Amino acid sequence: MPFIALPCGEQEYQPMPGAKLLEARLALGMKRTEFGHLLGMTGENRNIYVTIKRYEEERRPISPMVERLVLMLLWHKSDFGYLPDLDRGERVPQETPAAFAAAGS
């Protein structure tokens, strides 16, 4: 995955385009509600679904923090081949890849 500069500093922030968020969600293989939960959204599933849909349709701007988290999740998946289990605070995948299993024996 190519280097992507994160928004920071003196530059005026331009929100992530909704199409990029949609592309990221699909790359992670997630439904809108699952994606919202992964981003730390709480509340009723319907509200989470609608929020993600509005982000994707550019009817609501994507905050810099959401953008950074999405990019970090994409990088993690790209580097390690899985998403972290943020709910349980685990850093290892549920099914250990053969390379990790071989290194441990």
Image (tube, rainbow, N blue to C red):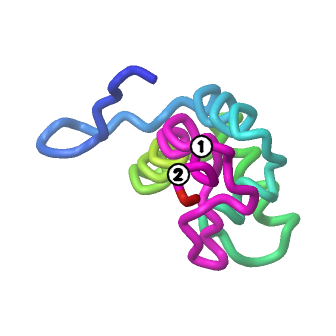
Q: Position of residue 75 (x, y in %)?
A: 48, 39
Residue displayed at 60% across by 60% down: 84
Q: Which quadrant holds the N terminus?
A: top left
View extreme (left): residue? 10
Q: Look at label 1 and name its amino acid.
A: Ala
Tell me, yes or no, whether the highlighted magenta stretch contains residue 90: yes
Give the magenta-colored segment's residue range.
Answer: 74-103
Q: Is residue 96 above or below residue 79?
A: below
- Among the 4 quarters of the image, the one containing residue 19: top right
Residue highlighted by disc 1: 99
Question: Is disc 1 surrounded by few (<14), some (14 to 19) or many (20+) residues within 10 Å?
Answer: few
Residue at 59 percent of width and 63 percent of height: 92
Report the front residue among 34 and 96.
96
Compared across the picture, whether 43 is left or right of 64 comes to right
- Does the CB distance between marks 1 and 2 fall below 8 Å? yes
Q: Is residue 58 magenta?
A: no
Query: On the picture, is 3 further left or further right than 93?
Result: left
Residue with the mark numbered 2? 103
Q: Position of residue 103 (x, y in %)?
A: 52, 51
Instruction: Locate residue 4 relative to residue 11 in the image: left or right.
Output: right
* Cα–Cα span, label 1 and label 2: 6 Å
Provide residue 28's location: percent of width, then percent of height: 70, 40
Determine whether the residue tagged by mark 1 lies in a helix, strand or loop: helix
Instruction: Point out the image quarter for the C terminus.
Output: bottom right
**Towards the viewer: 25 or 47:** 25
Q: Residue at position x 34%, y 28% from top? A: 4
Q: Position of residue 62 (x, y in %)?
A: 52, 46
